[in-house]
C-alpha cells in the first residue's frame, strides 16, 4: 500500500512542500481592499443635493459612493455580484467603457496604461466562478516597473484584481501548485474541492502506512534503520523524524476544505441549533429618508467616501466610512431622527441575547484581546475588544459581538473549534502565542519541517522510480513468457 500510493503521490508531496515554503511569504495575488477604498473620491454636500432614496425593491447590501465622478448605488445581491444604479435617477448604469477603465487604472496605479485586452472569460489570475456576474473584464497592462496588471469589471466599473510580475511568479511557485489553483479546475468548485480531498485522503494513506512500515522494518540492535543502501536508509530515517509532521500536514490540508464529522464532537446535525443574530437589509421597512437628510445629520461632514445601509436589530442603520475602510461612524433612525449610535453596553447585549437565544442559557463576557479562536488578519479585520457570548446549547456555540454595532462578527461551535485546530493549528502552526510573540519562529519552524518533508519526498520519489522500473520489467518478462 505504501509503495503504490507513495509512487502515485511522491512527486505531488515534493511540490506541496516546496510551494508551501513559498506560501509562507506570498499568497495568491489580490487587489487590496484598503487601496481600492482609499481611491474612492470624497462625497461633498453638492453630490447629496439631488439623490433619491434607495428603492424598496432592491435586495441585498446597498452602498452609496462616487463612480466616474457621479454618485451611484451599488446593490450586492450575492457574493461579488452587483448592480449599479444612478443615485439621481435610480436607473441602472450601463456597461463601463474602455476609456473609463483606462482612466481608472491610470489614476489607481499612477502610471499610464500600455494596452488593454477585453476578457469575456476568466484567466489564471481570476479563477473564481463567483466573479462571473462581473464579466467581461478590461485587462489593463500598466507601463510601470512592476509590470502591474489591473482587471476592471465592465459591469461594475470596479477593480476586481491586481497583479504584478513578482506576485505572479510567487503564485506560480506557491499558491497555484499548492492549492491546485489551475483555472479550469478551480472554476469548477465542486470538482476542485473533491480533487483536493481525494488527493489529501490518498496522502493520509501514504503517510500512515509509511509510519507503520517504518516501525515494522526496525530490528532490535540494528540502530535507527536496517538499510544499507543510501536512499533506502535516508528515506527510512527522514520518515522517522518527519513522518508525523507529513501526516499532520496532509491531514490538516484535508480539513482545510472538509467539515469535521459530527461524530467527532458528539453532536448530530439535528442537534445543531441555528442561532439567528444578524439580519438582512430590508429597505421596505426603511423610512423615506433622503441621502441629503442623512448628510445633514452627520457630525462629520468632510471626507465621506461611502455610506452603507444596514438593518441591525430591527432598526435602520447608516454606516458612514471616512478614511478607515474597516471602522465606520454608525447612525440609526428612530422616531423621525437620525442619531449617532453609541457603543452597546454589556447589559444591552445581554438583553438582545435573551431575545435571540430563547430558553438557552448563556454567559457573556468582554474579551479584551485576540486569542486562538478570535483574531483578525490582513484580509479580515476584527475589532478589539469584543463581547463573547457562550451559549449552553448542544453545539456549545460561541458568538462574538461587535460592541460598536451589536452585529455578530464571528461564530464558533464544537465542530468549528476542532476544525480550527485540525487546519489552522496543524497546517500553519497558527497559535496565538506564536503569531503575536514569535512570528519569526513560527515561520522558521514551518520552513525547517517543510525541508524535512522535501527530504522524505525526494528519497521517496527516487525509490518510487526504482520500484516502478522493477515492476514494469517483471511484468514485461511475464508477458513475454
Image (spheres, rainbow, N blue to C red):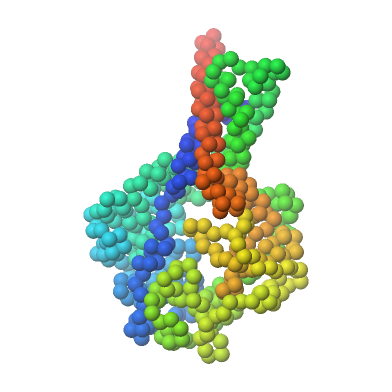
Q: Residue at x 73, y 72 (%)?
A: 358
**Left or right: where 92 falls relative to 437:** left
Q: Quadrant of residue 35?
A: bottom left
Q: Residue at x 59, y 36 (%)?
A: 246
Residue 77 lies, in percent from the top left, at 48, 68
Residue 40 lies, in percent from the top left, at 36, 69
Q: Quadrant of residue 133?
A: bottom left
Q: Residue at x 45, y 55 (%)?
A: 129
Viewer-nearest residue: 447 or 113: 447
Q: Quadrant of the N terminus?
A: top right
Viewer-nearest residue: 155 or 105: 105
**Left or right: where 267 falls relative to 474:** right
Outermost residue on the top side: it is 481
In the picture shown, does residue 319 fall above or below 469? Answer: below
**Left or right: where 100 falls relative to 413:** left
Outermost residue on the front side: it is 437
Q: Quadrant of residue 445?
A: top right
Q: How many marks?
A: 0
Residue 27 lies, in percent from the top left, at 45, 48
Residue 244 lies, in percent from the top left, at 63, 35
Amino acid at each position: 500500500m505504501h509503495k503504490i500510493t507513495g509512487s502515485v503521490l511522491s512527486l505531488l508531496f515534493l511540490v506541496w512542500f516546496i510551494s508551501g515554503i513559498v506560501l509562507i511569504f506570498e499568497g495568491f495575488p489580490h487587489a487590496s481592499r484598503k487601496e481600492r477604498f482609499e481611491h474612492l473620491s470624497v462625497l461633498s454636500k453638492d453630490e447629496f443635493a439631488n439623490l433619491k432614496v434607495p428603492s424598496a425593491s432592491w435586495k441585498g447590501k446597498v452602498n452609496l459612493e462616487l463612480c466616474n465622478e457621479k454618485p451611484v448605488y451599488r446593490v450586492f445581491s450575492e457574493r461579488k455580484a452587483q448592480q449599479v444604479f444612478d443615485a439621481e435617477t435610480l436607473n441602472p448604469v450601463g456597461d463601463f467603457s474602455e476609456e473609463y477603465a483606462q482612466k481608472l487604472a491610470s489614476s489607481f496605479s499612477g502610471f499610464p496604461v500600455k494596452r488593454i485586452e477585453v476578457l469575456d472569460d476568466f484567466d489564471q489570475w481570476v479563477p473564481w466562478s463567483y466573479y462571473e456576474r462581473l464579466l467581461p473584464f478590461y485587462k489593463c497592462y500598466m507601463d510601470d516597473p512592476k509590470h502591474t496588471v489591473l482587471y476592471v469589471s465592465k459591469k461594475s466599473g470596479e477593480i476586481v484584481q491586481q497583479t504584478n510580475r513578482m506576485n505572479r511568479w510567487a503564485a506560480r511557485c506557491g499558491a497555484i501548485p499548492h492549492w491546485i489553483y489551475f483555472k479550469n479546475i478551480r472554476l469548477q468548485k465542486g470538482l476542485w474541492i473533491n480533487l483536493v480531498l481525494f488527493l489529501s485522503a490518498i496522502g493520509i494513506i501514504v503517510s500512515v502506512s509509511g509510519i507503520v512500515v517504518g516501525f515494522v522494518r526496525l530490528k532490535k540492535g540494528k540502530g535507527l534503520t536496517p538499510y544499507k543502501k543510501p536512499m533506502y536508509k535516508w528515506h527510512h530515517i527522514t520518515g522517522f523524524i518527519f513522518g508525523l509532521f507529513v501526516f499532520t500536514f496532509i491531514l490538516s490540508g484535508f480539513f482545510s476544505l472538509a467539515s469535521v464529522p459530527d461524530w467527532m464532537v458528539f453532536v448530530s446535525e439535528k442537534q445543531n441549533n441555528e442561532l439567528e443574530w444578524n439580519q438582512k437589509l430590508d429597505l421596505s421597512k426603511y423610512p423615506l429618508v433622503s441621502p441629503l437628510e442623512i448628510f445633514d445629520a452627520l457630525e462629520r461632514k468632510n471626507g465621506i467616501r461611502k455610506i452603507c445601509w444596514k438593518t441591525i436589530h430591527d432598526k435602520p442603520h447608516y454606516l458612514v466610512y471616512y478614511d478607515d475602510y474597516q471602522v465606520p461612524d454608525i447612525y440609526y433612525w428612530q422616531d423621525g431622527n437620525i442619531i449617532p449610535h453609541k457603543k452597546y453596553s454589556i447589559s444591552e447585549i445581554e438583553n438582545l441575547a435573551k431575545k435571540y437565544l430563547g430558553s438557552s442559557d448563556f454567559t457573556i463576557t468582554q474579551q479584551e484581546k485576540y486569542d486562538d479562536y478570535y483574531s483578525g488578519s490582513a484580509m479580515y479585520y476584527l475589532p478589539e475588544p469584543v463581547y463573547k457570548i457562550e451559549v449552553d446549547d448542544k453545539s456549545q456555540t460561541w458568538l462574538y459581538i461587535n460592541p460598536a454595532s451589536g452585529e455578530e462578527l464571528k461564530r464558533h461551535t464544537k465542530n468549528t473549534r476542532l476544525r480550527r485546530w485540525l487546519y489552522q493549528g496543524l497546517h500553519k502552526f497558527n497559535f496565538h502565542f506564536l503569531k503575536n510573540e514569535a512570528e519569526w519562529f513560527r515561520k522558521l519552524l514551518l520552513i525547517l519541517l517543510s525541508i524535512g518533508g522535501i527530504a522524505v519526498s525526494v528519497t521517496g520519489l527516487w525509490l518510487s522510480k526504482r520500484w516502478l522500473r522493477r515492476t514494469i520489467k517483471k511484468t514485461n518478462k511475464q508477458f513475454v513468457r
